[in-house]
Each structure stands twice: as C-alpha cells, then as structure tokens.
Image (cartoon, rainbow, N blue to C red):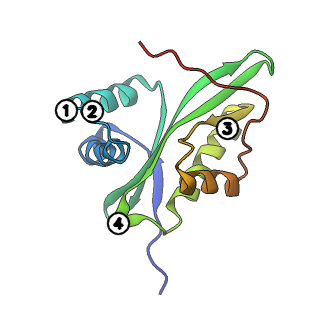
Amino acid sequence: MSPPQPVIVEATQNHLPALTETFGQYLAFYNVEHPVEQVHSFLKERIANRDSALFVAELNGEIAGFIQLYLSFTSLQLGRFWVLNDLFVSEKFRNKGLAPQLLSRAKQLLIDTGAKAMMLDTQISNSKARKLYEDFGFVQNQESVYYYLWV
C-alpha cells in the first residue's frame, strides 16, 4: 500500500488556524519572531484580499507545507511574472517530495495566468533549497544584482 498523497489546494479562511501555526514554524526557521496575532492577521489579509497566491499541502489532516507567490510585472518582457516569496514544509513532513509538488502547483499558476516567469531569492547558505530550485529548473541569475531598500 502506497503512502497517502498530499492534497494541494488554495488556502482559505478555514485554513487560518493551522496555517498560522505552520507559518510560525517557517518564521522560526529564519529566526524571525512576530506575535501570533500579527501572523494570523497578515495571512487573513492575504487570503481575504487575494493579493497573493497561497497554496497549502494537506497531508494526514494537517497542513504539511505551503507556498506563497506575489504577482508582479516585467516591462522588458511586457508581461506578468510571479515572485515565489515563501516555500515551507514542516519538519515532520520533509523528504516526502512535498516541496517539488508545491513548486509544480506554482508552475501551473504561471501557465494558468499566462505569466512569463517565476522568480525567487534564497539565502546563499540555504544549500538544500538551492539544490531543490536548481533540480526543478530554476537558473541562477548571472546578469543582474538585486538590491533591497528596507525601511
């Protein structure tokens, strides 16, 4: 008998309690702390306003992971692209192929919306994520340098 397969669905308000907990694990992975109420409010707004594409992987009745993307535009390609901002699989569900399945769902979003590309950034030190992305077909940019202005 094969193990149960995850179901990947768009996040809804019904997912908020469990998603808030899983998102908290994601923030902890990056050593970022926010009050749980603030995390819940942030996710609730994303879902309600539909200003991100947020998908959850449900497995064994739990949220095993999620992926969140934001729509942007490329003037040079005269089209849309998606920024993969968040991808996370809870520790107890890792090494079960969930991250590639979440990435596949994101790739389908590109196709469904007629987008030109998906872009992401990750920490240089996150070798596991970098390998995952490269294995999936992402190519490291060798032509541009990205800058941030945090306020």
**Circle 4 residues within 10 Å: few <14, some 14–19, many ≥20:** few
Which residue is denoted by mark 1 in the rendering?
A: 35
Q: Amino acid at mark 2?
A: Val
Quarter residue 115 falls in: top right
Q: Position of residue 142 (x, y in %)?
A: 77, 35
Helix, strand or loop at mark 2: helix
**Circle 1 residues within 10 Å: few <14, some 14–19, many ≥20:** few
Which residue is denoted by mark 2 in the rendering?
A: 39
Helix, strand or loop at mark 4: helix
Earlier along the polypeptide chain: callout 4 or callout 2? 2
Which residue is denoted by mark 3 in the rendering?
A: 110
Helix, strand or loop at mark 1: loop
Q: Amino acid at mark 1?
A: Pro
Label ID, residue 56: none
Say left or right for 135 vs 151: right
Frontmost of labels 3 and 4 is 4
Question: CA–CA distance between discs 1 and 4?
Answer: 23 Å
Residue at the spot 38% in from the left edge and 43% down from the top edge:
30
Between 39 and 2, the one nearer to me in the picture: 39
**Marks 4 & 2, CB-CB < 8 Å contact:** no
